[in-house]
């Protein structure tokens, strides 16, 4: 074994010194993945990244901002994903420090770093080449990289048929380092992205192929030393099988499941007080679904505030099964020119464009009432159609005995024989599935809004 090879039982890594007191560059191997797994993972993650609401493709480094800053909480960190393809990307640098964890493709990757400062580049054209170092990462490998602000770097694949890497990058302080005033303003607005935080190396200093080849090379590996026959055979096998593992016959899918308690649901006789009986006194169908909670199960809040959260839950956390039933119903009744909606019928008017009457300044309702102590709040929903009229009531009542009742009640007045037939067909499904499912999922959201759909969160992040 060559004398320059060092054997380590822990994570093999290197540290490159920085110029002028800056932070060093550190590269560490963590684990070896299965044969060809690197190409497959980079391909899968790259496709998912492309569908992210914050995806941007620039500077040969497609990326997505997965999490922004929270400056009100003194947190200036951000999280990004990025991909480097087979062709690599240009030398560039960032004002602040960077830390990322990455997976190399099935041909491995070469990481290039140069610590030359602006003053050194201006005084000596050869400064860039003298500070240039190369670090070779083996195929299908999990590794970490950390370097300080101002470090020039470039990543490339070891073979043009394979991607270089996919990474998750942490910007520990998005405001750190010297940057233009325009960029700093963009960062303070929490509107930065990787391209806007990137400065490309001036073309006059781009290294030639011969300069790159002549730069010192450090090779990291796991299980077998880089110059060994075993390492060469392993690399050849991984390079051969990597493209095959990129092939996928399954569609790109991802799921988020809300695991919450099965809150008890009670069905009972329709309420004889409140907004609903007065809104539709002569009805042919009525039901009431009630969910009871103990006050210890949620943060203290008024009845009207909890009701607003429940209404938001109807919109943001609808049951998938009810959505499928509504889609089927909409197809069947569309030729009859009946009203259609993607939301379950009892609360479908929450999607109304009529803003003449709003509850909590946001939710369109037909009527609402809140008692003087704000211990009982209720809204009236509903619409008129060709075959029937329906009204629904959503009520929150804080009971003196320490429990909270949240109810969804409905009344329907049929207008013709088709309306009576329609209600006969959907009666059982509405009582035993649609209304309980709608109410349960809405309350789940009211109790844990942080578990809302992550795609919706990414597209519309909470105000900071």
Image (spheres, rainbow, N blue to C red):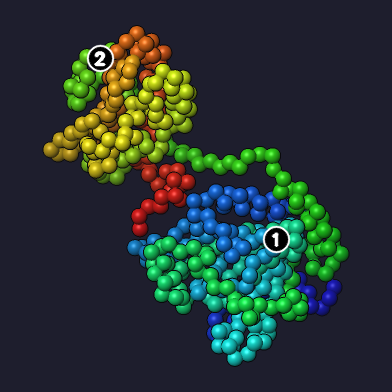
Residue 306 visible to the viewer: no
Q: Quadrant of the C terminus?
A: bottom left
Separation (CA) of disc 1 from disc 2: 68 Å
Q: Nearer the viewer, mark 1 or mark 2?
A: 1
Query: What residue is pinned by disc 2?
Result: 283
Of 440 and 167, which appears nearest the observer? 167
Instruction: Tell me the element at label 1.
Output: loop
Q: Residue furthest right?
A: 229
Q: Is residue 217 left or right of residue 18?
A: right
**x, y percentage for residue 306?**
27, 40
**x, y percentage for residue 232?**
83, 63
Q: Is residue 429 left or right of residue 269?
A: right
User: Residue at point 39% right, 14% down?
Assistant: 422
User: Residue at point 44% right, 49% down?
Assistant: 459
Q: Quadrant of the N terminus?
A: bottom right
Query: What residue is pinned by disc 1?
Result: 86
Q: Is residue 167 left or right of residue 241?
A: left
**x, y percentage for residue 452?**
42, 43
Relative to 124, say whether 231 is above or below.
above
Q: Is residue 84 left or right of residue 283?
A: right
Q: Residue furthest bottom?
A: 123
> How many other residues sit within 10 Å of disc 2, few (<14), some (14-19) or many (≥20)?
some
**x, y percentage for residue 406?**
29, 31
């Amino acid at each position: 074994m060559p004398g320059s090879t060092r054997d380590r039982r822990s994570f093999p890594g290197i540290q490159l010194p920085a110029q002028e007191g800056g932070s060093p560059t550190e590269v560490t191997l963590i684990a070896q993945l299965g044969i060809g797994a690197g190409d497959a993972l980079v391909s899968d993650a790259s496709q998912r990244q492309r569908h992210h609401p914050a995806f941007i493709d620039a500077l040969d480094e497609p990326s997505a901002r997965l999490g922004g800053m929270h400056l009100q909480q003194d947190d200036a960190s951000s999280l990004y994903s990025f991909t480097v393809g087979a062709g690599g990307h240009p030398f560039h640098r960032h004002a602040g420090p960077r830390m990322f964890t990455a997976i190399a493709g099935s041909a491995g990757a070469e990481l290039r770093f140069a610590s030359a400062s602006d003053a050194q580049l201006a005084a000596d054209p050869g400064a860039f080449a003298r500070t240039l170092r190369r670090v070779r990462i083996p195929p299908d490998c999990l590794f970490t990289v950390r370097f300080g602000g101002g470090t020039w770097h470039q990543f490339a694949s070891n073979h043009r048929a394979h991607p270089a890497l996919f990474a998750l990058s942490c910007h520990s302080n998005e405001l750190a380092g010297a940057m233009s005033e325009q960029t700093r303003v963009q960062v303070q607005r929490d509107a930065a992205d990787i391209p806007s935080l990137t400065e490309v190396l001036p073309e006059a200093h781009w290294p030639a192929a011969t300069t790159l080849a002549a730069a010192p090379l450090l090779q990291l590996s796991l299980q077998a030393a880089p110059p060994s026959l075993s390492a060469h055979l392993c690399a050849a096998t991984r390079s051969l099988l990597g493209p095959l593992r990129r092939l996928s016959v399954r569609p790109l899918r991802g799921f988020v499941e809300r695991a919450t308690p099965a809150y008890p649901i009670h069905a009972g006789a329709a309420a004889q007080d409140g907004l609903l009986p007065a809104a539709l006194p002569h009805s042919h169908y009525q039901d009431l679904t009630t969910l009871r909670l103990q006050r210890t199960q949620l943060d203290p809040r008024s009845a009207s505030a909890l009701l607003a959260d429940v209404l938001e839950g109807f919109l943001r956390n609808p049951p998938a099964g009810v959505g499928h039933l509504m889609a089927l119903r909409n197809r069947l009744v569309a030729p009859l020119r009946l009203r259609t909606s993607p939301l379950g019928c009892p609360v479908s008017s929450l999607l109304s464009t009529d803003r003449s009457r709003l509850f909590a300044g946001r939710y369109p309702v037909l009527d609402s009432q809140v008692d003087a102590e704000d211990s009982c709040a209720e809204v009236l929903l509903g619409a008129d159609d060709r075959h029937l009229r329906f009204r629904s009531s959503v009520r929150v009542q804080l009971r003196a005995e320490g429990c909270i009742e949240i109810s969804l009640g409905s009344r329907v007045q049929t207008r013709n024989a088709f309306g009576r037939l329609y209600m006969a067909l959907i009666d059982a499904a509405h009582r035993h599935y649609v209304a309980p499912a709608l109410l349960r999922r809405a309350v789940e959201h009211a109790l844990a809004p942080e578990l809302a759909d992550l795609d919706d969160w990414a597209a519309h992040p909470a105000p900071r």
